[in-house]
Amino acid sequence: MKLLIMGAQGSGKGTQCEELTKIYNIPAISTGDLFRGIIATGSELGKKVKTIIDAGALVPDETTVEVLKDRLSKSDCQNGFILDGFPRTMEQAKLLEGITQIDKVIYLNIETKTAIERIGGRRTCPNCSHIHNINYPGDPEYCSVCGTKYVVRDDDTEESILKRLQTFKEKTLPIVDYYRSKGLVIEINANINKEYALNQITEGLNNYLKGLGEY
């Protein structure tokens, strides 16, 4: 299966990707990880991406697609993949169509209030980078791993969260509607908990596979 997973910050994309890679034995691919990986290879393309990032600029869509196309050609993508974080704009969605088809789009729909509670509750250890959410059991002040006092990252403040959610609504949500018009979207209620969301996702994907006679 060739999948996209989409959702606003706090919807749990990363968590669900980890579980889905185990269940369906397909890799989860994010552009951030791709850029870091290709830079590490020292290839010409890697040097090109490094120059752009070191200059503080955004990697152009065409270069991102070039990197993504290279990644999708690897043997571990033969049976499918999960794209996380791309596309973020309609322009990117159109470019993606030029290099691969998408079978299903998992949309993790989360309410703004829930997203703020989840992200706003995050605390990060400045020493070991361990992350804890004060809405869950555990010491809300000191890291359970190394004992260092937690801090709130600048991008986890309510003002920053609201800006990111607004950007998602303006730039990325129209892509969900675009894929919905093609009948590709499996919409998930991401407001309850990760277990509930995962059950919804697997039910939707398994029904899709059954329809193809593959499950």
Image (spheres, rainbow, N blue to C red):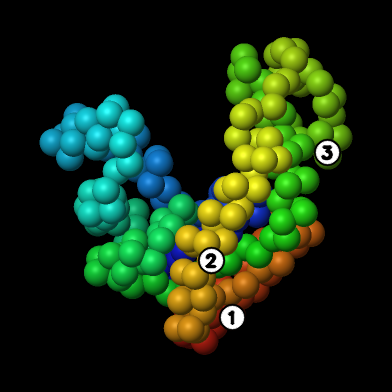
Q: Quadrant of the N terminus?
A: bottom left
In the rendering, at what x and y percent does residue 215 appear?
A: 53, 78
CA neighbours of label 1 inside 10 A, class few (<14), some (14 to 19), many (20+): some
Picture quarter containing residue 166? Answer: bottom right
In the rendering, at what x and y percent does residue 208 appear?
A: 53, 80
Q: Nearer the viewer, mark 3 or mark 2?
A: 2
Kind of residue indicated by mark 2: Leu
Q: Which residue is tagged 3?
A: 136
Name which of mark 1 and mark 3 comes first in the sequence: 3
Name which of mark 3 and mark 2 comes first in the sequence: 3
In the rendering, at what x and y percent does residue 2 appear?
A: 41, 67
Q: Which residue is tagged 2?
A: 173
Kind of residue indicated by mark 3: Tyr
- The answer to the question of whether label 3 and label 2 lie on touching residues, with beta carbons closer than 8 A, is no
Q: Nearer the viewer, mark 1 or mark 3?
A: 3
Indicate left or right for 210 with 202 as reference. Answer: left
Residue in front for this viewpoint, 111 or 125: 111
Residue in front for this viewpoint, 168 or 65: 168
Alpha-carbon distance for marks 1 and 2? 25 Å
In this view, 113 is above or below 152: below
Residue at the spot x=79%, y=18% of the render?
142
Kind of residue indicated by mark 1: Asn
Q: Which residue is tagged 1?
A: 207
Q: Nearer the viewer, mark 1 or mark 2?
A: 2
